Image (cartoon, coloured by chain):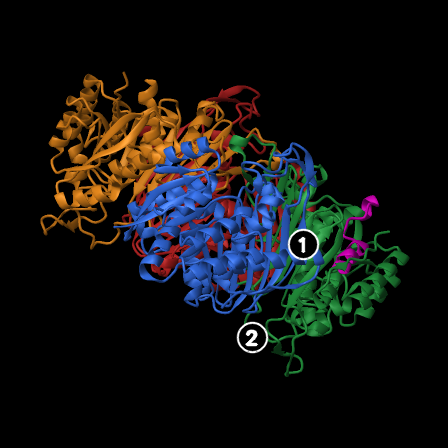
Chain colours: A blue, B red, C green, D orange
Amino acid sequence: MKKFRIGLIGYGFMGRAHSNAYRKVGNFFDLEHECILQAACARDAAKARAFATRWGYQSVETDWRKLIARDDIDVVDICVPNNLHAEIAIAAAKAGKMILCEKPLAMNGSEGKKMVAAVEKAKVPNMVWYNYRRIPAVTLAKQLIDEGRLGKIFHYRAKFLQDWTISADLPQGGTGLWRLDVKAAGSGVTGDLLAHCIDTALWLNGGIETVNAMTETFIKQRKHTLTGKVEKVGIDDACAFLARFNNGSLATFESTRYARGHKALYTFEINGEHASIFWDLHDLHRLQYFDHRDEGLVRGWRSIHVSDGDQPYMKHWWVPGLQIGYEHSFIHQVADFLKGIETGKPAGPTFRDALETQHVCDAVLTSAKTGAWQKVKTSAK
Amino acid sequence: MKKFRIGLIGYGFMGRAHSNAYRKVGNFFDLEHECILQAACARDAAKARAFATRWGYQSVETDWRKLIARDDIDVVDICVPNNLHAEIAIAAAKAGKMILCEKPLAMNGSEGKKMVAAVEKAKVPNMVWYNYRRIPAVTLAKQLIDEGRLGKIFHYRAKFLQDWTISADLPQGGTGLWRLDVKAAGSGVTGDLLAHCIDTALWLNGGIETVNAMTETFIKQRKHTLTGKVEKVGIDDACAFLARFNNGSLATFESTRYARGHKALYTFEINGEHASIFWDLHDLHRLQYFDHRDEGLVRGWRSIHVSDGDQPYMKHWWVPGLQIGYEHSFIHQVADFLKGIETGKPAGPTFRDALETQHVCDAVLTSAKTGAWQKVKTSAK
Amino acid sequence: MKKFRIGLIGYGFMGRAHSNAYRKVGNFFDLEHECILQAACARDAAKARAFATRWGYQSVETDWRKLIARDDIDVVDICVPNNLHAEIAIAAAKAGKMILCEKPLAMNGSEGKKMVAAVEKAKVPNMVWYNYRRIPAVTLAKQLIDEGRLGKIFHYRAKFLQDWTISADLPQGGTGLWRLDVKAAGSGVTGDLLAHCIDTALWLNGGIETVNAMTETFIKQRKHTLTGKVEKVGIDDACAFLARFNNGSLATFESTRYARGHKALYTFEINGEHASIFWDLHDLHRLQYFDHRDEGLVRGWRSIHVSDGDQPYMKHWWVPGLQIGYEHSFIHQVADFLKGIETGKPAGPTFRDALETQHVCDAVLTSAKTGAWQKVKTSAK
Amino acid sequence: MKKFRIGLIGYGFMGRAHSNAYRKVGNFFDLEHECILQAACARDAAKARAFATRWGYQSVETDWRKLIARDDIDVVDICVPNNLHAEIAIAAAKAGKMILCEKPLAMNGSEGKKMVAAVEKAKVPNMVWYNYRRIPAVTLAKQLIDEGRLGKIFHYRAKFLQDWTISADLPQGGTGLWRLDVKAAGSGVTGDLLAHCIDTALWLNGGIETVNAMTETFIKQRKHTLTGKVEKVGIDDACAFLARFNNGSLATFESTRYARGHKALYTFEINGEHASIFWDLHDLHRLQYFDHRDEGLVRGWRSIHVSDGDQPYMKHWWVPGLQIGYEHSFIHQVADFLKGIETGKPAGPTFRDALETQHVCDAVLTSAKTGAWQKVKTSAK
């Protein structure tokens, strides 16, 4: 088997999720490559070592530049806060490494553009961890749409609701809280949560033409963990926007961290001429499907328990009725990335695909400031 | 229009439900008969008058024998406790009245048999108020089964769960509580709740051959409202039984008034070779339907919102998406009874149909005592 | 008992729903007034007579002006297309009649303003049939909010999705289809469906400050039933808007008749600091409630089956677990209107309340044209 | 770290599930032991090698006796058909190995008794893979019950419904189909599916006193894969039974492979004086909980998304809202087994615990033959 020697930068939530994927993919998928956990990199040496021990990384680095410089690393996996993505990715591309980068691609479109240029110039395989595309139910939705089952699309609606930042006592910045610090995150729910919704939407429903957004920061000041001072909160706590897709469909998108009762409620619904689809991250193993061509007497929303062998990815797992979970989306993504390398047909979302999402986020944030409809840039070749 | 002059005996929960049905049926159904609320009968004259005033009954009686003797009454509606059904029904039949009798038909099969004999001898139209047959979703289930969509039936399971008698402080007997008094009710959940489950089951799935039951009385003694004394409780608080139908299918039935969290959770499910059906009284306007012949990729339970004009009874009501409620089942029953008279094709369940349910109840109660499988009597002609 | 002599204008869907309410309210509610179905009015004499016969109206008119002129009419109920509301209501007010008017109040705010002036000048009790306020689960939501259980409100989201106009073969105009004719309806989903969402929202969450909307007409031309010609479609098939409430909360609203799989899916959700609420017209007898103050280990959305006697309106109906339906909201509205008269505390929404909804609709339609945020007028005294 | 050197016998569905658990447990749980995949054993050498390669087993055996004889094996994991459990387990115990045995423990109680005697004589840690106990929602149910939140228990009901053997063309016996061959499986759904239901029930609700069962074999003859001939089917396709627990509660249990629409629908519900619990394997990450002590106005079933750090096992995984799947129950079981060794407090179900389940299964199968209530043996010390 060919070796796929991984250098992982960052050891947080995503560092764990990716490491788990690398360790498991070979047990469940037939691939030409074997994942080798070559090196884990983090500034704090003790933490890096502990992480490496737990996950089986064979070595440790505390400087990502050294990691990138190593000959025995094939791929760099970037799991650090958003403000570090561009610099690392561009350097890694120059070093000829394949790159797997956490989402969102960048702090904004102009940064993202440079990253795309770098990987395309270096011709290195690249991908962004928009993992929800590879939840089997979501992949099934894609398949149904591509087969034309929905017909002309009229509506798209997505939301991603959480409730974990309602307390005013929660600080901003630092480990586990950098998502509240605009300097590290770039934006709030827009880059963190809506980016997921947008990635899925572009994949399922094509390009977005124009958007009209509003944002709100409910808690205006929070103590900053790193400075110890109460500082202005720079991120958006909530964001909602209207959109029009290239295919003529209308959309609403909304995200917030102030929706009591929802831990991570990412839902989307698509209404087509013939059929509709609904999915919900809180019950991610199900797809709701309505087909108007069903006989009227017994027509209704079908609750599809996506766990059969003929449904996407599921033949690799257990038996019908036994659900998989969140983490499996990462395993599928690694499997597809490797198959992409093996077949020469790159799996998405590539950096270029993810740049489109960045452009939508930029337009959303601009519209929220100007109060006007904003045209979305496109980087499609 | 022909007149359908009603004499109603009893003014409780069922007296209200039936009166409402008589008052509304003509607004929504095209019938040859007009319901005339001719007389309301109750032992307590003041209560009878108040009831008559509220519902528009034109006269009042305090002795049911006088009511039956009146020439201006076409139909007698019996809404009194179970221990009075037989005497009144037999007398009414002798007087040549049509009869609508609350369920269960009788205290037991031998009483029921006499009632059947009486109405059949008198040749008077007769019916028992097993109203759940006429919830549109349940009627739709019947239609799907009769069309053969389920194929060979393997399983039937029904339950009727409530939680209103858990408190040991609740007395037995008297207004609103006669269902806890074995002398008035004959049995507990078996005659009150399982009788509904059995009626639906016989209608949907044919005759029951044998049963094996257990019952329990959790609270052994309760104060009796009428005597003021603590007395032994004679009813079954809970009853569960196994059954085999004539068609070879296996069944489980269960009812209790000790299931916390369930107000009136009547559910049934039928599993056939090709398709399955599930219904739930707490969401009575929906039918869950699974058809294995659907394409595997998008196969799932369909949640059918039974509110379209081509679904049973629904063209008489509002527009799609707008649900009807519990009380409408009674309106449908009156409409069907009247159509039965008008067309000469009697609507069920007739007394004879309801006697079958009585036989199953008897076998269940016997089996619970003997601990052995019990064959069910049949009164089918 | 005092008489409440009703003159009903129009015999369509709403004419039936209101008539049913008048006929039933006295059976279930204790009121000082008795509803008298005095006269039904429609231009087509035969249809008016048929309707009157079916529902028990004692007389018939074919000219609404004659109806209004009659001495034996206490209240005029307006169930005709939107373009006729203003003229009839103003005339009825001048004639000193009480007025119950179908929603939306008017074709637009300026018409509505004149109607408000007329009823306030005449000092006649008045109300608009925004019936959803009186679905028990919705009334319960109001009660929970008013008790402060939700705390500061962050988000409101509502949608009303249907799918009945997707076919391009459906004509516009004429009986049953006037809602597609802009001359009769004034607007499409905005006045028909979003008006309901807005009325509920203003009631539950207070005034709306600004809106930003988009609309779409998917089918540009339809045959007009009255002219027989293919004509431009003037209504909005779909409308979505962002909004900010006076209380600082953010909102999304959406309505369409192009959402496959949804017959009449009106849903709203409110997220507060402490608790959240969700309701769905397709299961109108349930309220979903999440309370963050519940112990974390067993915290979850509660599915409340609103059928207990201590829940709004339900003591008037059956027993716990037995649901009521859509039509009951109208009965509750009549009961509340009559109690309002009897107690001198008018029940809402009055014409003045409904004018606020009209102002929001106007702002929405304006914003959809200009593409800009639009401030909402207010008529609050 | 101490080594936990595993010798796995069998490479089917369970062989995969266990291997996955051994490989992952150390990444997510802090343990004193490290799992070492020492040897995989299967009669077919090529299959054994392929399995070992895929999962990282360091060596291969084709004779389980040789595996057991090896000095470098600490624990034997038995994943072969039921008819081989006893012989292997007894030999492994004699060899002083720890034993993890797939469920059900044995072909019947008498075999199970010998196995218990063997492990207890040898004093080797032992466990049976009734993995559902360690689905977080099920463990939470146990915790709530043990805290006394439900009060006196009135009812228990469980079912395990599948639909994969409805086709008469499905053969019996051989790889993947030994569950249909009575000689390999001992029984049908009783040992395969009801055993799970019974294990959970005994754990949550205590001992079962008496049972009354019926079984059915819908397809009487099937081709046998090994002999190539059509042979009588010896297993039960469906089994339902009534039961009484020692604590006075009543129960119904049912399992079948003929319930269209259900892939692996294991559900249980417990009704107590104060609260009720419901769980469903098809949405295994949720627990439904009803607490009567909640205020009446807002009382309802709570849908608990069991994914918070304070809920059983979940702090080891991702973040709130992100569900885990079926396979995680095995990881939890390995973690608990190892903690049991480390702390000297053995985790259940031990062989002795599992023998109780075997006794219930025996009583069920006997009752199905005799048609009479059957007392359950107990092996409790």
Residue A304 vs residue C128: left or right?
left
Residue D112 vs residue A311: left or right?
left
Residue drawn 53% across the image and 56% down it: A112
User: Which secondary structure, mark 1?
Assistant: strand
Does residue B340 appear anywhere in the picture?
no
Nearer the observer, D155 or B96: D155
Circle 2 chain: C
Q: Amino acid at mark 2?
A: Ala
Q: List x then y, in percent, for residue B366.
A: 34, 33
The image quadrant of residue D31 is top left
Q: List x then y, in percent, for residue D288.
A: 48, 37
Q: List x then y, in percent, for residue A370.
A: 71, 58
Nearer the observer, B352 or A327: A327
The image quadrant of residue C368 is bottom right
Mark 2 neighbour density, 10 Å: few (under 14) some (14–19) many (20 or more)? few
Q: List x then y, in percent, for residue A239.
A: 63, 51
Residue C324 vs residue D340: left or right?
right
Q: CA distance from mark 1 to mark 2?
A: 34 Å
Residue C146 shown in magenta: no
Q: Which residue is mark 2?
A: C168
Mark 1 neighbour density, 10 Å: few (under 14) some (14–19) many (20 or more)? many
Give the magenta range.
Answer: C341-360
Q: Amino acid at mark 1?
A: Met
Q: Which residue is mark 1?
A: A214
Circle 1 chain: A
Residue farthest right in this picture: C121
